[in-house]
Image (cartoon, rainbow, N blue to C red):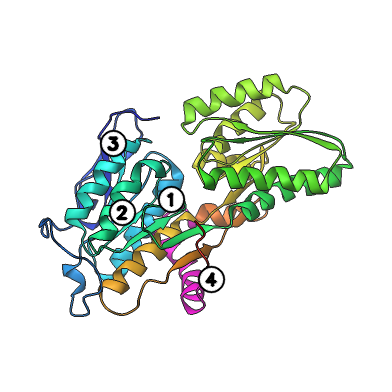
């Protein structure tokens, strides 16, 4: 997983006039955005009530600019920046690349003294850099993956991932109940074992089956893979090795498409589901190939984190400490058309999510941040 590519996906208002497709990564590489000022090593960030929006230097750093989960968060961050007139640096490696992300974060310590939001799948690699930023007085918010002890980060925006996993499994169990099926075998996987967000989703799936359908054997959670090619290969092996299973679920993004592909190849008689909103996976929900997907509402998390940093830097609101428990949504054939329409543009997403954001800001869903 620790490749050495330092390629970067950047999004932002400055970039819209120049879009280039990166070969092989299938991501949009946009021209750099964000202010070039504020490079002094001793900058201390955040909380300047006299700051003007156009002068703020804030960054959102995603984990993998090639996959839907990160793109959604990055678009949410960009939407918040546009709403407040802030030229937010929105960047990510062109693929999952922890060392490249560390370099981006270290650069952001210099270029984004007013705040950094970080979404990572390699939190162990980021801990030291995060602690340096916090020690320098820069507000840092962890998004989607809880911060590790030693990072100094006191604000985390993320889902109740056990509940999100249960939500997906509950739909499979409901369908099995309609079929009168009480015994069988379900395979549950996580693309990156050891990442709490993904592990907890898988734990929730297994828990739902164990509690509600004790006649089902649950295999896993086992490992799949985070990238589309590796995920498809891993799931092909898992399906072949568990030919007597009828339910296959993954806690990650890539599997929503790869499981659909495998299900079609097997005649469409399996119950396949995963997470996130990649286009091929949503199409498979629409035509019934996938029974559902769990949407962790990543756009909303990116928006919330970036708005918190902006309002803090403007002196309007302090960043709350603790775990901000963000919402998730089940996507099935019944509501997938609405979700697909929402996904057509960032403007449509913001219109959809803005009431949810306002509701959360009015009543912050804060719980203690353990660890």
- Circle 2 SS class: helix
Task: Mark 2 or mark 4: name the one nearer the start of the chain.
Answer: 2
| Quarter where residue 21 is shown | top left
Give the x, y percent position of residue 174: 79, 49
| Residue 73 rendering spot, x and y as whole percentages | 41, 53
Give, as a single range, the part of the protein colored magenta. Answer: 342-366
Q: Which circle's residue, 3 or 2, is located before the other in the chain? A: 3
Identify the residue position indicated by label 4 in the image.
Answer: 365
Percent x, y of residue 161: 59, 52
Q: What residue is shown with label 1?
A: 148
Query: Residue tagged by mark 3?
Result: 21
Q: CA distance from mark 4 to mark 3?
A: 39 Å
> What residue is pinned by disc 2?
131
Eyeballing the image, is 335 above or below 245? below
Mark 2, mark 4: which one is toward the viewer? 2
Q: Secondary structure at mark 1?
A: loop
In the rendered structure, which disc, 4 or 3, sits on the residue that comes first in sequence?
3
Name the N-terminal-most of marks 2 and 1: 2
Q: Nearer the viewer, residue 79 or 235?
A: 235
Q: Nearer the viewer, mark 3 or mark 1?
A: 1
Give whichever of discs 4 and 1 has the lower sequence position: 1
Task: Give the secondary structure at mark 4.
Answer: loop
CB within 8 Å, label 4 to label 1: no
What mark, if any, has residue 303 been given in the picture? none
Instruction: Identify the mark nearer the N-term, 3 or 1.
Output: 3
Distance from the alpha carbon under mark 3 to that under mark 2: 35 Å
């Amino acid at each position: 997983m620790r490749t050495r590519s330092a390629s970067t996906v950047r999004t932002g208002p400055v970039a819209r006039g120049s879009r280039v497709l990166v070969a092989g990564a299938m991501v949009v590489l946009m021209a750099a955005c964000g202010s070039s000022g504020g490079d002094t090593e001793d900058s201390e960030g955040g909380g300047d009530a006299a700051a003007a929006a156009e002068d703020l230097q804030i960054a959102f750093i995603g984990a993998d600019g090639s996959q839907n989960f990160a793109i959604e968060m990055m678009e949410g961050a960009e939407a918040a920046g546009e709403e407040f007139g802030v030229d937010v640096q929105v960047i990510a490696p062109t693929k999952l690349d922890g060392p490249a992300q560390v370099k981006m974060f270290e650069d952001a310590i210099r270029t984004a003294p007013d705040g950094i939001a970080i979404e990572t799948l390699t939190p162990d690699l980021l801990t030291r850099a995060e602690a340096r930023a916090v020690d320098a007085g820069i507000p840092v918010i962890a998004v989607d993956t809880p911060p590790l002890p030693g990072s100094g980060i006191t604000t985390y925006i993320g889902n109740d991932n056990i509940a999100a996993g249960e939500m997906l499994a509950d739909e499979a169990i409901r369908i099995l109940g309609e079929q009168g099926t009480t015994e069988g075998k379900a395979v549950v996987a996580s693309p990156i074992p050891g990442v709490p967000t993904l592990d907890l989703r898988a734990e929730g799936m297994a828990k739902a089956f164990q509690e509600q359908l004790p006649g089902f054997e649950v295999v896993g959670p086992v490992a799949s893979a985070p990238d589309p090619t590796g995920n498809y290969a891993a799931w092909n092996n898992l399906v072949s090795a568990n030919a007597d299973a009828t339910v296959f679920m993954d806690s990650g993004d890539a599997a929503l498409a790869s499981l659909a592909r495998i299900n079609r190849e097997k005649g469409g008689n399996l119950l396949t589901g995963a997470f996130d909103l990649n286009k091929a996976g949503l199409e498979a929900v629409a035509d019934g190939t996938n029974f559902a997907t769990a949407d962790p509402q990543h756009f909303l998390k990116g928006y919330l984190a970036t708005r918190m940093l902006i309002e803090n830097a403007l002196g309007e609101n302090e960043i709350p400490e603790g775990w901000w428990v963000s919402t998730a949504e089940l996507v099935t054939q019944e509501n997938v058309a609405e979700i697909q329409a929402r996904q057509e543009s960032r403007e449509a997403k913001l219109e959809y999510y803005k009431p949810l954001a306002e509701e959360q800001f009015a009543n912050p869903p804060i719980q203690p941040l353990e660890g």
